[in-house]
Amino acid sequence: MVICAPEASPAPAGQSGEGLLAALDIGGTKIAGAVLDRTGRVLHRVQRPTTGQGPAQQVFRAVGDIVTELAALPQWERVGSLGIASAGPVDIGRGTVSPVNIPGWRGFPVVDRVRALPAAAGLRVTLCGDAVAMTAAEHWIGAARGCRDALCMVVSTGVGAGLVMDGAVRNGPTGNAGHLGHVTVDLLGDPCPCGSRGCVEQLASGPSLVRRALAQGWQPSGQADGPGLAADARAGDASALAAFDAAARALAAAVAAVATLVEIEVAVIGGGVAEAHDVLFPPLRRHLAAYAVLPFAAGVRIERAALRADAGLVGAAFLAADLEPAGIG
Ligand SMILES: [Zn+2]
């Protein structure tokens, strides 16, 4: 891992002894919660599976249960803020979420509902998108630490991203800026559920990779899923390698566009597909060299995300506490 300011101190002195942070990470398959210290260390973590289906109140019950469980911890009285990261789209101004894979929540007022929980009384409660949270986490203590300008991407069942500009996470008026998964890179490509076509997500998400590989003749030697495709690519299967190459090309075009538009030092890539970095990153770097050609964009680096499953919790906690990122060079 290359960081932008290797000499930066781990955290501003004195912060670890002050108040604690709390966070929730709401997705279509699980809801997680945590109490963290002011260096981003997770002190206690709880998680509940959810199908994301059912009426709004039923899905929210899992959120309430997690907050209640966290509030029973002795450290809870030192918690001053609670950050909520949610699958998008989100509206941070209204405090509402409409996660694609939680159909019961459309314009759901998650911030008001969490604030109304007795355990959350008196806490500063804020909302962010899950990719923005990942970006904040990577910028705070991960692979984008110390960077003034960076792109962070989650390549998984979907493709999400967030931007760091001038040393801070920039998420736009509704909190959705950086939604790179739904930028078109194939002008006449497949229709996307978002309504557009040829989106990055249609080429680079895990399910898209598998679907396209199968359509182009991939015969899985094991499971017909992302890890199975990566294993076959490692073994030299031409169809599997071609699928990763197409995904890498889409990601490279997206990274090059961002680098050309706003000048970034690094693109940090995490998520399930990035676990196959050994077969994804070499073609990604090769295609990036072909697309990011202007002198100010040509130097952008590709780095693997440093945080894994806790990135959403860490970033939401950071944003809610309104902390300063350390060591911007
Ligand atoms: Zn789309």
Image (tube, helix red, strand yellow):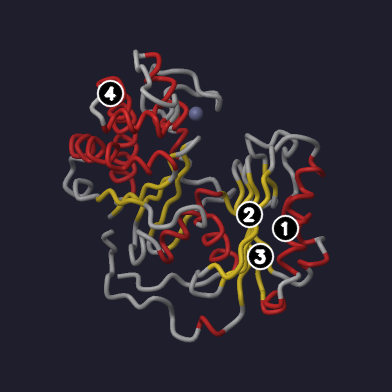
Mark seen at residue 28: none
Q: Which amino acid type is marked by label 1?
A: Ile
Query: Which residue is at a point 63% across and 52% down the rendered structure image?
Result: 92
Q: Which amino acid type is marked by label 3?
A: Leu
Query: Circles 2 and 1: CB distance less than 8 Å?
Result: yes
Residue 51 placement: quadrant: top right
Instruction: Answer with left or right where residue 135 lies relative to residue 117.
Output: left
Q: CA distance from mark 4 to mark 3?
A: 44 Å
Q: How many marks?
A: 4
Q: Which amino acid type is marked by label 2?
A: Ala
Neighbour class for label 3 at 10 Å: few (<14), some, many (≥20)? many
Q: CA distance from mark 1 to mark 4?
A: 43 Å
Mark 1 or mark 4: whose residue is earlier in sequence: 1
In percent of width and height, residue 152 lies at 40, 50
Mark 2 or mark 3: whose residue is earlier in sequence: 2
Reading the image, the residue beneath label 1 is 66
Query: Which residue is at a point 62% across and 68% down the rendered structure image?
Result: 35
Q: Secondary structure at mark 4?
A: helix
Mark 1 or mark 3: whose residue is earlier in sequence: 1
Mark seen at residue 242: 4
Reading the image, the residue beneath label 2 is 32
Instruction: Answer with left or right where residue 175 lies relative to residue 233.
Output: right
In percent of width and height, residue 79 lies at 67, 74
Of the 4 image quadrants, the one containing the N terminus is: bottom left
Neighbour class for label 4 at 10 Å: few (<14), some, many (≥20)? some
Of the 4 image quadrants, the one containing the C terminus is: bottom left
Reading the image, the residue beneath label 3 is 82
